[in-house]
Image (cartoon, rainbow, N blue to C red):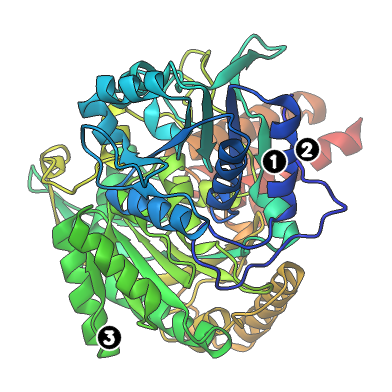
């Protein structure tokens, strides 16, 4: 059975600027998880806690308890990256547990209580760690266990290395993978629907953490714009981010937006920097992070940031010792900007990060959750996080589902033609988990040349709701949202966004028509959908109209014309998702009246 909330009689702790993983007072969920563990004394324990909630503090407190009570004699921590491995060793040292982060082979120095290693390191020498686990009673802490999916060499190595361990503690903020390979040492339970799902021993989700003030509320600022590119065949295509289009077109439009030579990235970076300036009025040391797709783009973004701000950005390109030091230096400074590549971003644990730019084409829910997790660690109540994203349907779906708690599903029955929104290829999963960036040959998969891009403020997403009307970069309407204070309670954020939107709507009504070159419709009335979803809306409308034909005796054409007259807009073939939805609701209303 999964425990989903902490003991409510315990008030959440706010450790302020306590070093990573070393809060001197347990939060309510950490205390609740400790009590659950001590009561049950399990060999395997899976703790799922949202990024930023304090998994490290919980794990090290538990390790200290197990060592003190002689349940175990040594500790092995397995982390995804070199940087996180070192962070674990530093955090453990602060509470008297000495872990060797440089261990590679042979006997361990007597002064150490254990080792901190990476999944890649275990993958290279699983028998070394198996022997260590057999020789002494060992607690193995598997950080971000979702990295050890069973079909991967890392998963096989973990099973081989740590099967003899006395105790195993699995930690993750994102327990789901899109493949169906079991994660080592995780229990799966079959539901009433016959589908096996991962079962956590203790869960502390984003919604709980937000309510306790342990994590920051996240405001997503989405930017659209016109993209133009040339295909391999020499055809020039143009599309607007957020409009329904094929998967290939979405991919190419997205990559065009992220091209540093266009206007989209400079405008979004400029907006993010203005947002950072606003946040720093309340949080003076707040920092910002750009998550880039590759090294070349990362360097170009850093150059743009210098041109925009007059200051350089810390550049982190690979998971090596130099990168680790740069992250530490940035964390200890009050510098404004850092740019990191892909998987390296998961090792970036800098609590002062409050503004992010999602400038990568990785579209897996796991990577998105981990990326957003870089910005949610709260140091004091009222801090907010702001993440800038392109108007891509999958990303907006992930943003709207921040509070949805997902388990890893082993069985995924699919109806014919049904598409799983969380499905991804093994190759894409590999891309999201690369330790070092390299030329993967992606450019050859969908050959194209980015020609031109511009940016338009599209909407704000917060707590599952959408706000705002489109606005030009640098406009007063855009600044309304960029200027939201950096210190606000979650309910204040919602109220402020509603007021901003109301003001924007009132202003648009006073504006001359010739200035109204953007969609002057609130975000909630212009949903962003995929090409397939748009086709389904048209089909649904035609089905309902067909049923109403029999009910009313009127021809199809007459009903469609009447719907256009009442609801407005072009013919169904040209109508937007919002217009189709409005007509669907209207024809349902008519049908209900006739019953």
Q: Quadrant of residue 329?
A: bottom left
Indicate the position of residue 393 as horizontal and vertical percent values.
Answer: 46, 48
Q: CA distance from mark 2 to mark 1?
A: 53 Å
Q: Nearer the viewer, mark 2 or mark 3?
A: 3
> Which label's residue is closer to the chain start, 3 or 1?
1
Dot 2, how many residues are within 10 Å of its Cα: few (below 14), some (14-19), or many (20+)?
A: some
Q: Nearer the viewer, residue 378 or 309?
A: 378
> Which label's residue is closer to the chain start, 2 or 1?
1
Q: Nearer the viewer, residue 554 or 406?
A: 406
Q: What label does residue 308 carry, if any?
A: 3
Residue 167 horizontal side relative to residue 131, left or right: right
> Which label's residue is closer to the chain start, 2 or 3?
3
Residue 500 horizontal side relative to residue 63, left or right: right
Q: Residue at x 51, y 52 (%)?
A: 396
Mark 1 sits on what residue? Answer: 34
Indicate the position of residue 555 as horizontal and vertical percent values.
Answer: 68, 31
């Amino acid at each position: 059975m999964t425990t989903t909330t902490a003991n409510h009689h315990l008030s959440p702790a706010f450790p302020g600027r306590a070093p990573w993983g070393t809060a001197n007072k347990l939060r309510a969920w950490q205390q609740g998880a400790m009590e659950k563990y001590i009561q049950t004394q399990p060999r395997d324990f899976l703790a799922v806690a949202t990024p930023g909630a304090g998994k490290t503090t919980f794990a090290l407190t538990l390790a200290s308890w197990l060592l003190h009570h002689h349940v175990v004699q040594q500790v092995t921590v397995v982390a995804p990256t070199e940087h996180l491995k070192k962070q674990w060793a530093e955090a453990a040292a602060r509470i008297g547990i000495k872990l060797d982060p440089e261990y590679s082979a042979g006997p361990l120095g007597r002064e150490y209580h254990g080792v901190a290693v990476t999944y890649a390191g275990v993958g290279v020498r699983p028998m070394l760690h198996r022997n260590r686990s057999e020789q002494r009673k060992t607690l193995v802490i598997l950080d971000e266990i979702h990295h050890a999916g069973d079909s991967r060499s890392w998963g096989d190595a973990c099973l081989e290395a740590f099967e003899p361990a006395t105790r195993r503690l699995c930690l993750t903020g994102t327990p789901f993978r899109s493949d169906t390979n079991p994660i080592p040492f995780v229990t799966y339970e079959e539901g009433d629907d016959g589908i096996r799902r991962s079962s956590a021993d203790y869960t502390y989700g984003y919604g709980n953490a937000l309510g306790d003030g342990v994590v920051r509320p996240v405001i997503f600022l989405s930017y659209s714009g016109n993209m133009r590119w040339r295909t391999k065949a020499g055809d020039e295509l143009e599309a607007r981010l957020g409009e329904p289009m094929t998967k290939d077109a979405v991919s190419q439009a997205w990559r065009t937006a992220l091209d540093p030579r266009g206007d989209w990235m400079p405008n979004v970076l400029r907006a993010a920097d203005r947002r950072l300036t606003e946040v720093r009025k309340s949080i003076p040391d707040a920092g910002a992070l750009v998550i880039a797709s590759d090294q070349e783009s990362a360097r170009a973004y850093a150059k743009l940031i210098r041109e925009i701000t007059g200051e350089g950005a810390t550049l982190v390109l690979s998971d090596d010792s130099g990168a680790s030091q740069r992250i530490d230096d940035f964390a200890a400074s009050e510098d404004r900007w850092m740019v990191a590549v892909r998987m390296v971003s998961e090792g970036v644990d800098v609590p002062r990060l409050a503004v992010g730019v999602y400038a990568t084409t990785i579209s897996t829910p796991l990577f998105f959750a981990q990326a957003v997790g870089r910005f949610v660690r709260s140091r004091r109540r009222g801090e907010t996080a702001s993440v800038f994203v392109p108007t891509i349907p999958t990303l907006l779906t992930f943003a709207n589902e921040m509070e949805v708690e997902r388990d890893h599903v082993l069985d995924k029955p699919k109806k014919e033609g049904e598409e799983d929104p969380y499905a991804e290829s093994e190759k894409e999963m590999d891309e999201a988990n690369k330790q070092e960036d390299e030329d993967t040959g992606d450019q050859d998969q969908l050959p194209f040349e980015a020609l031109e891009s511009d940016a338009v403020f599209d909407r704000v997403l917060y707590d599952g709701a959408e706000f705002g009307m489109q606005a030009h970069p640098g406009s007063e309407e855009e600044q309304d949202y960029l200027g939201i204070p950096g210190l606000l309670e979650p309910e204040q954020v919602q109220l402020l966004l509603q007021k901003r939107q109301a003001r924007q709507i009132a202003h648009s009504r006073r504006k001359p028509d010739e200035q109204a070159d953007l969609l002057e419709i609130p975000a909630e009335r212009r949903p962003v959908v995929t090409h397939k979803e748009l086709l389904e809306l048209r089909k649904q409308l035609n089905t309902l109209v067909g049923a109403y034909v029999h009910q009313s005796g009127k021809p199809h054409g007459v009903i469609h014309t009447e719907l256009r007259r009442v609801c407005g807009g072009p013919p169904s073939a040209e109508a937007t998702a919002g217009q189709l939805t409005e007509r669907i609701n209207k024809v349902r209303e008519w049908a209900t009246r006739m019953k």
